[in-house]
Every structure is written in structure tokens, then in C-alpha cells.
Amino acid sequence: MQSTRRFIDRIFLVVKGLAMGAANKVPGVSGGVVAFVAGFYEEFIYSLQRVNKTAFKLLFNGRFSSFYRYINGKFLALLFLGMIVSYFSVSKLLDYLIINYELYVWSTFFGMILGSIYYINKDFGDWDRRTLIFLTIGVLVGLSISFLNPAKENDNLIFVFFCGIISVSGMTLPGFSGSFILILLGNYVLLLVDSVNALYDTISDIFSGDFSFVNDTARIRMLKVLSVFTLGSVTGLVTFSHILNYILHHYKKITLATIIGFIIGSLGVVWPWKKTIYMLNDDGSFMLDSRGEQIILNYQRFLPEASTETLLAVIYIFLGVLIVLGLEWYGQRTQQIKS
């Protein structure tokens, strides 16, 4: 019975990784919110900050099992396995759903964020003038980011490394969407679409025995970009985790208040009723990315009119709330079983 429960817990941890990976790829949605609501955010940050001098000393001395235990390797490995699988499966499905059912996808995410706000606030209970000030700061920062216009695409490797550091914020800061930050930096398509597709095509070529890609300069360039972006992401992940672990330990109340503010502010990004604004060339034509698709500049938000479509969207919002409440119920049940 105990072994079955451990197996189920591991499966659910991979599923949580899938959810984090999918959320990180969607502009406006934060993988950190998934970690927060699913109840493993602090363990996630704690595990990441264990990647330090002691860990590298164990690794370089060949003490691999000690290194694995020290960094909470089982937890991180299963979680990141889910994230990696997500980038080649769930996130592809999300791309399809956003293209074909955009309103309902955004409605579901909007509901999930509403549910997250309820979930986090329910157990907070430390509101005073100080925490309300940091809540307001978080809301203003979140809303301000959602109305900024993006820069143009830039594949300079130093800038790509910087993008990796910044984009990983979505995993460590709930409500702070790393993918939306990449849109603002102009590199969302380059780093989360084109380079990932290049890796996917390369893996497919290798398994089929086709190595002609080594002479494809564009493909090699994309793989270099993805490698540098990944290195920047790992650097940012470890760095942010150390900073956040310190802040959560010493300033937990105001940190959580600010995080709640970020999450509330992110509602502006995922507001379901919006019209997409595309980048235009000087001649008024649509600016296209490397795949020949129109590049999104931002969104023009509006209030919905009464219609069957609006009613369905509201139903999906409630569905999003129920998903979060379901996660909360599962987390509480798991804790009760363990205790």
C-alpha cells in the first residue's frame, strides 16, 4: 500500500511538472502559480537553492548519491521530467487550442488565476498596512507589465543568455509570466517556438539516421541559441532560488503579499476578451516571424457583450476555478494521508 502511494505521488509530481511546463510557455500564465497552488512551491525553491558550493563539491568528488540526496534529486528530477515532456507534448496541444479556441483557453486560465488568488489569500491571514502596501506594489507591477509594447527580435547570444535569466522568473515568481516577458523582450517566437522546433527536428533527424542538419547553418544557429538560452535559464533558476529562499525566510509576509499582487496583476494579461494587435511594417503590412506567421504586439482588451459565446466563456472561467480547488483538495488529502 505504501509503495503504491509513493508511485502515485511520483506520477502526480510528473503531472505537476507537465502543468508547470505548459503554464510557463503560455504568455500571461506563470508556472510558479502551479507550484504555489499545488503546494510544493517552497520545497521547489528550497531544492533549487541546494545547488550550491557543497553540491558541486559532492559532485566533483564523485559522491553522486550524496549529491542526489543533498539537492532533493528525486523531487527535482521528476518535476523537470514533466516540464521537458510538456514542451514537446502538452505545450504543443496548448498552441493548437489557443489558435482554435482562444477565448475559452484564456477564460480557463483566467479562472485558474482567480482560484489561485482565493487559495493563497485564504491561508495568508496576515493583512496589515505594510503587507497591503506590498500587495498594491505587486498589482501595479503586474498590470504595468501587461500593457507594455514588445521590442523586436534579437538573436545576439549575450542578449539570449539574459533572456534565459529573466524568463525563468515565471517558475520562481508566481504571477510573473516568463513567457510574457519574452514577448516584451521580442524573443518569444525565437526562443520558445523556433529554437524548440529546431531541437525537435534535430532529434527526429538523428533517430531517422539523417545527419544532414550539420550543414544547415540556420539549424545550427537555432541550436546554439537554444543552448545559450537554456544555460541562462539554469543560471537564473539557481540564482533566483537562492535570493527567494533568503527573502521567504526573512520577509515571508511581505513576499507572499507581493506575490499575491503579481498574480492579481497578471489578470490583465489573461483577460479573455481581447483583440490581438499585430506588429506592422512601415508599409502597413503584417510583420512576419521566421515561420511566416504574424508577430503579436499586444492586446486590446474590451468588455464582453451578452451572447452564447460569452456564457460559454464564463462557464470555462468557473471550470478554471474548479481545477484549482481540485488541486487544493488533492494537496490537503495527500497531507492527511501522510500524517
Image (tube, helix red, strand yellow):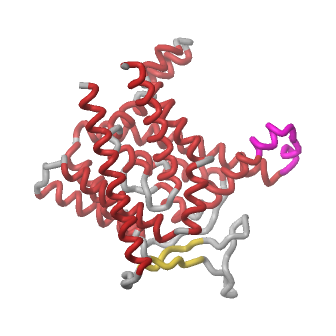
Q: Quadrant of residue 6?
A: top left
Within the magenta stretch, is there residue 211?
Answer: yes
> Seen from this angle, which residue lies furthest left?
128
- Tell me which segment is drawn in magenta: 202-216
Q: Is 35 positioned to the left or the right of 237 in the image?
A: left
Residue at image location 53% in from the left, 77% down from the top: 276
Q: Is 317 positioned to the left or the right of 128 in the image?
A: right
Quadrant location of the N terminus in the rendered image: top left
Where does residue 250 sit, x and y in percent of width and height? 23, 38
Quadrant location of the C terminus in the rendered image: top left
Of 321 and 148, which appears nearest the observer? Answer: 321
Residue at image location 63% in from the left, 45% down from the top: 228
Q: Is 95 positioned to the left or the right of 79 in the image?
A: right
Where does residue 155 sit, x and y in percent of width and height? 67, 57
Residue at image location 38% in from the left, 25% down from the top: 5
Of 332 and 290, which appears nearest the observer? Answer: 332
Within the magenta stretch, is there residue 101?
Answer: no
Count of picture labels: 0
Q: Can you say whether 215 is above or below 291 in the image? A: above
Q: Quadrant of residue 130?
A: bottom left
Residue at image location 33% in from the left, 51% down from the top: 324
Where does residue 39 sit, x and y in percent of width and height? 32, 40
Q: Can you say whether 76 is above or below 210 in the image? A: above
Of 62 and 26, which appears nearest the observer? Answer: 26
